[in-house]
């Protein structure tokens, strides 16, 4: 049963399986294990980024395509829901319209970019995606009457998904069963389904062909596969999943703006998460996203505690002062890339 | 020769600024093994890649079973029934041996009899089925490359120097396997520098030099005539092996 859910793609390493189970269980029971607004928000972001990073892994790790337009597709999905909720009011119909619209636009744009530029060398494709993504970000910030410009859009979501809605009057394990909890599980279940779907795709004959294309495009052509078609299909699929992840983010944070979806910073974060987790493994997305977002969220407070604890010593409190958290985040990345050149998953698999 | 399977007439191919094929005329009859000989740089591999559509001919005509295929996209040529085993063991090294084989099985599933025939022909295929192809030895990779090309019945197989860089024992095994393949309904166009292998397998032979076919005839005739070999292939040492 589990084997079927995972499409036969087992972690193949005991420690890796253990880490993945811990992450999955922690996310599944996050509202009860880690009560509090901040931790629930972190858990939801982890779910969303697992999907986003896994969809990028389909492109980078499995097909060997470097694209800088992934946040653009993520943003299109988020803006789809944001615009639809702003225009049609807080209803599930509006969410559905936004999700479908955003995904369709992302897919169509990916198809156009793929067909026009996947024939050229990899480096040119990367440049084209960079140019299109930058142009799109400028467009969104300029069309402020529609998109809210740099300020973004704030909107209401259906009341069922807000903290004001009470599903049950009682508390379970001291947690209120409210709309926020429902929203979390909407995000969690959608992310789970999308992740398992991606796992199914990469383990299908289609996924096998993608790996062959990555390995050697000419040989794949010579045994009868139209490489351009497979590359374009992977681009479109990954764009659609990224758009769906964007839609989840838009529903969860009830705000959509360039800084939360379109920025180059997020693009670099995604790249780092794929590399740290392990390219071409899917499970790497789970580990990379979890580690990265936990570090991003909690490193600062952890360092604050460390500064406090080392207050008596010379120099060290200055080094671990919370305002230096970005430097330490950087050091963490360098160390992890140095020690895990194949990502955490690659490392754990080679041991197990 | 009545109704050949493949004909090239006056084919020219350029690679960048270089004019590699300068009017190749080549006829591959149905059935048996046609060998393409010639010294390094004569244009043998370029001929195979042009047939396969990996290089576009700038002039000339290529007909496969009477149909023009010059300039057709590679995947279409492959689906028309031509398989290609490139030089340097063209395997997908990140995929397992089994996955490599599955890629070539366009019908989705394997024909069980054919698969067990191939496994008997090349035992390492069965032994290393679950292993990544990148971990195989040179000879095993070459066996996988040939096995992948024949997993489904093809009408024509282009094989580029299957003996290159292999130990003598493996060359013998490869020769035997290709000999068995020859007994099936498949036509083979073999590029080979190893004259012993070429003469053991070949029915007809074409010799290339400077981008043209300079001799075409029966293999037996060339094998028996040392003077002709000397004249056609010059001082190429490999041909005397």
Image (tube, helix red, strand yellow):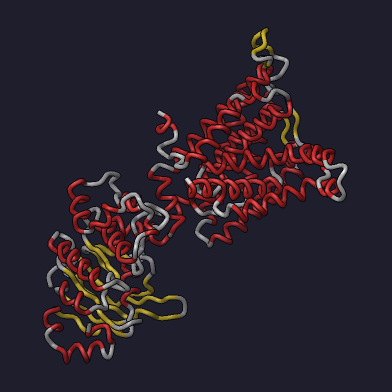
Look at the image and tell me whether residue A352 can be seen: yes
Q: Nearer the viewer, residue A146 or A261?
A: A261
> Residue pushed farthest front?
A312
Q: Nearer the viewer, residue A310 or B186?
A: A310
* Residue B163: image location, x then y, percent: 27, 72
* Residue A40: image location, x then y, percent: 68, 27
Kindly identify the residue that appears in the image at 18 percent across and 53 percent down.
B117
Left/right placement of residue A162 relative to residue A222 reads right
Q: Quadrant of residue B225?
A: bottom left
Left/right placement of residue A5 relative to residue B35 reads right
Q: Quadrant of residue A99?
A: top right
* Residue A342: image location, x then y, percent: 54, 52
Q: Nearer the viewer, residue B139 or A222?
A: B139
Quarter of the image where the C terminus of chain B is located: bottom left
* Residue A263: image location, x then y, percent: 71, 46
Count of labels in the image: 0
Left/right placement of residue B17 relative to residue A154 reads left
Q: Indicate whether B190 appears above or below A218.
A: below
Look at the image and tell me whether residue A105 can be seen: no
Quarter of the image where the N terminus of chain B is located: bottom left
Q: Indicate whether A87 appears above or below B101.
A: above
């Amino acid at each position: 049963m589990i084997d079927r859910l995972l499409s036969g793609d087992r972690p193949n390493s005991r420690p890796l399986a253990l880490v993945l189970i811990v992450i999955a269980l922690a996310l599944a029971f996050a509202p009860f294990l880690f009560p509090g607004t901040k931790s629930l928000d972190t858990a939801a972001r982890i779910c969303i980024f697992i999907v986003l990073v896994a969809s990028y892994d389909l492109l980078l790790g499995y097909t060997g395509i470097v694209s800088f337009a992934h946040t653009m597709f993520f943003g299109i999905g988020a803006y789809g829901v944001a615009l639809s909720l702003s225009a049609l009011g807080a209803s599930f119909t509006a969410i559905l319209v936004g999700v479908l619209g955003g995904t369709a636009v992302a897919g169509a744009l990916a198809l156009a970019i793929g067909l026009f530029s996947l024939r050229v060398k990899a480096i040119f494709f990367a440049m084209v995606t960079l140019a299109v993504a930058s142009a799109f970000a400028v467009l969104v910030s300029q069309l402020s009457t529609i998109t809210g410009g740099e300020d973004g859009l704030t909107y209401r979501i259906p009341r069922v998904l807000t903290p004001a809605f009470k599903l049950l009057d009682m508390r379970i394990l001291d947690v209120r069963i409210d709309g926020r909890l429902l929203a979390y599980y909407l995000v969690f279940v959608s992310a789970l389904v999308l992740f398992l779907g991606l796992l199914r795709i990469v383990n299908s004959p289609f996924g096998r062909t993608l790996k062959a294309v990555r390995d050697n495009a000419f040989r794949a052509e010579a045994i009868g596969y139209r490489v351009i078609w497979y590359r374009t299909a992977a681009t479109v699929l990954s764009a659609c999943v990224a758009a769906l992840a964007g839609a989840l983010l838009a529903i969860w944070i009830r705000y959509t703006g360039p800084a939360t979806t379109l920025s180059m910073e997020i693009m670099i974060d995604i790249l780092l998460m794929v590399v740290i987790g392990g390219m071409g493994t899917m499970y790497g997305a789970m580990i990379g996203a979890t580690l990265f977002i936990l570090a991003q969220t909690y490193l600062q407070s952890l360092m604050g505690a460390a500064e406090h604890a080392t207050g008596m010593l010379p120099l060290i409190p200055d080094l671990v002062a919370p305002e230096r958290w970005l430097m330490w985040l950087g050091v963490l990345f360098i160390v992890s890339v140095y020690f895990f050149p194949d990502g955490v998953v690659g490392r754990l698999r080679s041991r197990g | 020769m009545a109704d050949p399977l493949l004909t090239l007439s006056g084919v020219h191919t350029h690679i960048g600024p270089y004019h590699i094929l300068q009017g190749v005329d080549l006829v591959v009859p149905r059935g048996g093994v046609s060998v393409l000989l010639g010294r390094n740089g004569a244009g043998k591999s370029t001929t195979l890649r042009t047939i396969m559509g990996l290089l576009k001919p700038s002039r000339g005509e290529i007909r496969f079973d009477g149909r023009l295929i010059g300039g057709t996209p590679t995947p279409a040529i492959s689906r028309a029934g031509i398989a290609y085993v490139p030089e340097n063991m063209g395997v997908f090294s990140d995929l397992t041996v089994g996955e490599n084989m599955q890629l070539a099985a366009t019908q989705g599933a394997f024909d069980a009899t054919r698969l067990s025939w191939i496994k008997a022909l090349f035992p390492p295929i069965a032994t290393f089925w679950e292993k990544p192809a990148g971990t195989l030895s040179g000879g095993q990779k070459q066996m996988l490359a040939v096995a992948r090309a024949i997993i489904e019945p093809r009408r024509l197989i282009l094989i580029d120097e299957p003996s290159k860089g292999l130990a003598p024992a493996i060359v013998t095994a490869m020769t035997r396997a290709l000999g068995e393949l020859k007994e099936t309904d498949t036509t083979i166009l073999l590029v080979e520098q190893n004259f012993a292998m070429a003469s053991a397998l070949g029915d007809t032979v074409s010799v290339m030099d400077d981008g043209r076919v300079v001799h075409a005839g029966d293999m037996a005739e060339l094998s028996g005539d040392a003077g002709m070999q000397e004249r056609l292939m010059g001082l190429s040492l490999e041909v005397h092996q």
